[in-house]
Image (spheres, rainbow, N blue to C red):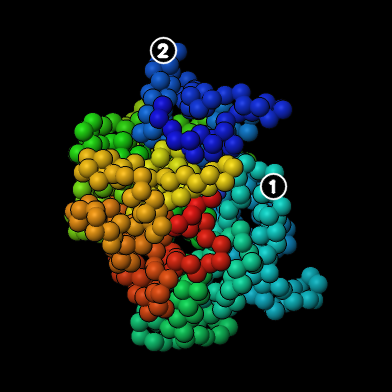
Amino acid sequence: MKLSENAIKVLEKRYLEKNEDGNLIEDVEGMFKRVAKAIASADENYTDKAGIEKIEMEFYEMMANLEFLPNSPTLMNAGRPLGQLSACFVLPVEDTMEGIFESIKNAALIHKSGGGTGFSFSRLRPKGSAVNSTGGVASGPISFMKVFNAATEAVKQGGTRRGANMGILRVDHPDIMEFITCKKDNSEITNFNLSVGITEDFMKAVEYNLEYELIDPKTKKPVGKLNAKKVFDLIVEMAWKNGEPGIIFLDRLNRDNVTPKLGEIESTNPCGEQPLLPYEACNLGSINLYNMLNEEKDSLDFDKLAETVKKAVHFLDNVIEANKYPLAEIDKMTRGTRKIGLGVMGWADMLCALNISYNSQQAIELADKVMGFIQDNAQKASQELAEQKGAFPYYEESVFAKKGIKLRNATTTTIAPTGTLSLIAGVSSGIEPIFAISYIRNVMDNNELVEVNPVFKNAAVKGNFYSDELMKQIAKSGTVKHMEEIPKEVRDVFVTAHDVRPEWHVKMQAAFQRHTDNAVSKTVNLSHDATTDDVREVFTLAYRAQCKGVTIYRDGSRDLQVLNIGKVQ
Ligand code: CDP
């Protein structure tokens, strides 16, 4: 198994099983075996012992060859007592004291198990409105969000990974201005990503520079008006300042809600890629596209990809069975719709190996082709599973019933960020461009290590221009854009996130969205000197290109940047 030192370190620290003294009792191979066994066992009612063993072997090989990896909670918890396997949850926040604190409790239980939670705070009555029982006034959604945030902070210390939340407020909620600016000071509400829930009506009002109505969620009555363009400009300005809030297009999430009879979609998971109904959970998994190339690494092996999609859908469907859900309501909803989210990672590395620039029409066309292929095959696999095991229980309530398409899963595809998965697999994350061609990592006893993108290293060795000195030189800026000593064809292909102009980021996101049931996790990177007009342009492009939401990040705009070019801890 070819895992980097970094990957092994992360796995040992957080994923591999330890005894009470904190000593490791499994290795990486052991982890994949544990996971394969637990997930294959969900087929016990459908096949015999030999059949289970065969499935187990298939699952194991797919993971050990780094062709497919399930989301982190599955790797951490499958076959272990906790058994919570999903990364994504959405919880309702009702407009009562009981409802609010019930939700905080449930979120804590989910965070403890490695899952992330999304909430819409839109049902909460606005700040200053009456509270009948006490005669007092309500504190409003933003002050309650701070309580959710503090609870997350406290649980963080005990869990396997930092608790993450998504907080959404509808743009027509009376407290929207406070929401948009509430992370102006970056030390506030740090365990939340925030997105404004945008409506089509609002976007029309922006276009025609009109006012729009603010609605009190309790009384459903208009209580004020704002100029849409001014609100939009404020979102843009705040996002320019420090990347938040993002925006999500609520009407689009609901246009693609395949079970509208079960309720409205109000929120997504923390990174925005998975819209869910209240109390719904979803488990994700990603195919490593770099490992879907042929042996020569010069063309995509579509047969292998089709095979892997089929096995991955089977795997993720089994995760729904093997999963131990933290709440009875979640158990019911999640088993009822059986949503899964199959996505990809290593997209940029794959493009580089194929000598295709990320920021090119050719790459966009390939994105349509590859994701279209994955989507078709995932649906086909879900249909085959439905024939064998039955359609998802809420099928009759779904839009598929009318069409007569029996599926095992209400959704099959999602593009996750693959923050840790891509690190384990040693490839570029999700559908993002390469972040840096090489960078310097501080290792123990203050030694510095130059990490080089493996695909670039191959190209450099093949092209006869590899040297340690050159790699060190590249690490200073991360990019090879201006390095004349590197052949131009190579520089054109090995573009980094900052070399790619924002519109290409959006085009790529839109291409993947066209073939994805759920949503696409993507950050549109902007250079430090980008203007608010640039941010507005990105938001508008994303809206026109039918994206379901958009997040931007202007380089250096936050004091604490996780991945700094030049130096990575
Ligand atoms: O790579 P990995 O499976 O660890 O996760 P990811 O693809 O980066 O993130 C997928 C989802 O996992 C996020 O959208 C969150 O719902 C959840 N997550 C979380 O709850 N806490 C984190 N620290 C990271 C991710």
Rendering coords of residue 5 (x, y %): 48, 35
Q: Quadrant of residue 145?
A: bottom right
Mark 2 or mark 1, which has the lower sequence index? 2
Do we see residue 103 in this rendering? yes
Q: SS class of the residue under badge 2?
A: helix
Residue at figure coordinates x 68%, y 65% from the top left: 146
Which one is nearer the viewer's eye here, 447 or 391? 447
Q: Residue furthest right?
A: 134
| Quadrant location of the N terminus in the rendered image | top left
Residue at figure coordinates x 64%, y 67% from the top left: 188
Above-or-below relation of 437 to 307: below
Rendering coords of residue 394 (x, y %): 45, 43
**117 left or right, relative to 388:** right
Q: SS class of the residue under badge 1?
A: loop
Label 1 amino acid? Gln
Q: CA distance from mark 2 to mark 1?
A: 43 Å
Q: Residue furthest front?
A: 469
**524 left or right, relative to 157:** left
Residue behind label 1 places its C-beta within 8 angstroms of ligand 1: no
Above-or-below relation of 296 to 430: above
Checking the image for residue 346, the label placed there is none
Report the residue marked by disc 2: 50
10 Å crowding of disc 1: few (<14), some (14-19), many (20+): few
Rendering coords of residue 467 (x, y %): 31, 44
Residue at figure coordinates x 30%, y 40% from the top left: 290
Report the residue marked by disc 1: 157
